[in-house]
Amino acid sequence: MTADPLFYEIFKEIPELFFELIGQPQKDPSIYKFSAQEIKQRGFRLDGLLSTSEAYPHEPIYFIEAQSYKDDNFYNQLVAKVILYLTQYQPPNEEWYAVVIYNTKSNEGNFPRYLNFFLPYLRCFYLDELAKTPNQSIAVGVMRLIVENKSKEKTGELARQLISQAKQELTDVTLEAKVLEFIKIVVIDKFVNLSREELEAMLNLESLRKSKVYQEGVEEGILKTKLETIPRLIKLGLSIEQIAESLELDVETVRKNAQQ
């Protein structure tokens, strides 16, 4: 099973968007840790897991899958991985849920009736359907930006809408900075040959620089987010020079942080 690694960057770096997606924005994301936990039997690996420490046994853990193609064996594998994880690690949490995020409902495969015992713990979200609802959430918008194959013009339009929405709706300036930077990273990943000038024009970054994120002095937080992003962009295949230009950093800074 494969999934876009940018999905899991969201859940790792901005778990607030995951909880917004599943309708539980009141959850405290600081008590969760994201991982791609290995299950030794049969070489299974969970695509994503949001787990807590033993200090929070009353909070559920979340198994996360992002699925962008149809696979009639998908649910068999998902159930096997969840059961093996619970058997092997025996977490103290009283509850757990399996969350599957489909880019489109048509990519959902067959659900075998013999797995009906799993249904009370399964939550499925379909981005194509959620996109049709009024007042689309930032979480849905960012995930749509990842999975949808659009032209530069359409991608830029959606990205600018999300930037504007984030600036209007997010009151936590640190969270706002993370979301805005992640939107930029998604666009960079989709169009790796964009020059800095083209990226600025596509996202209207001149307007972004005038936002409250910059005005309230969180440039340091944005720099930290950029530096943490460098190793992940390296893994996505971007060169040192491309990353430096896209993130507006000098080449030496990028090279230094790429080695960490």
Image: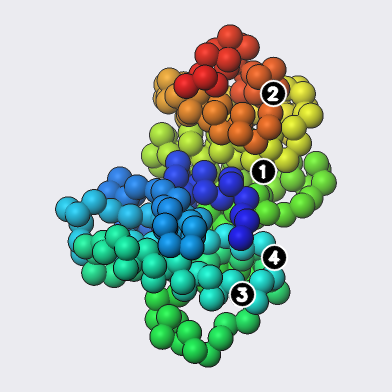
Residue at 58%, 45% in the rendered image: 6
Q: CA distance from mark 1 to mark 3?
A: 34 Å
Which mark is in front, 1 or 2? 2
Which mark is in front, 3 or 4? 3
Mark 4 vs mark 1: which is more N-terminal?
A: 4
Query: Residue 69 has which mark?
Result: 4
Residue at 69%, 65% in the rendered image: 69
Would residue 148 appear left or right of 46 to someone viewing this image? right
Q: Which residue is mark 3?
A: 73
Q: Nearer the viewer, residue 86 or 102?
A: 86
Mark 1 vs mark 2: which is more N-terminal?
A: 1
Which of the 4 image quadrants contains residue 103?
A: bottom right
Query: Residue 239 has which mark?
Result: 2
Which of the 4 image quadrants contains residue 86?
A: bottom left
Report the amino acid beneath label 1: Ala
Mark 2 nearby-residue class (10 Å; few <14, some 14–19, many ≥20)? some
Mark 1 vs mark 3: which is more N-terminal?
A: 3
Mark 3 vs mark 2: which is more N-terminal?
A: 3
Which mark is in front, 4 or 1? 4
> Measured from the top left, where is residue 134 in percent x and y?
59, 65
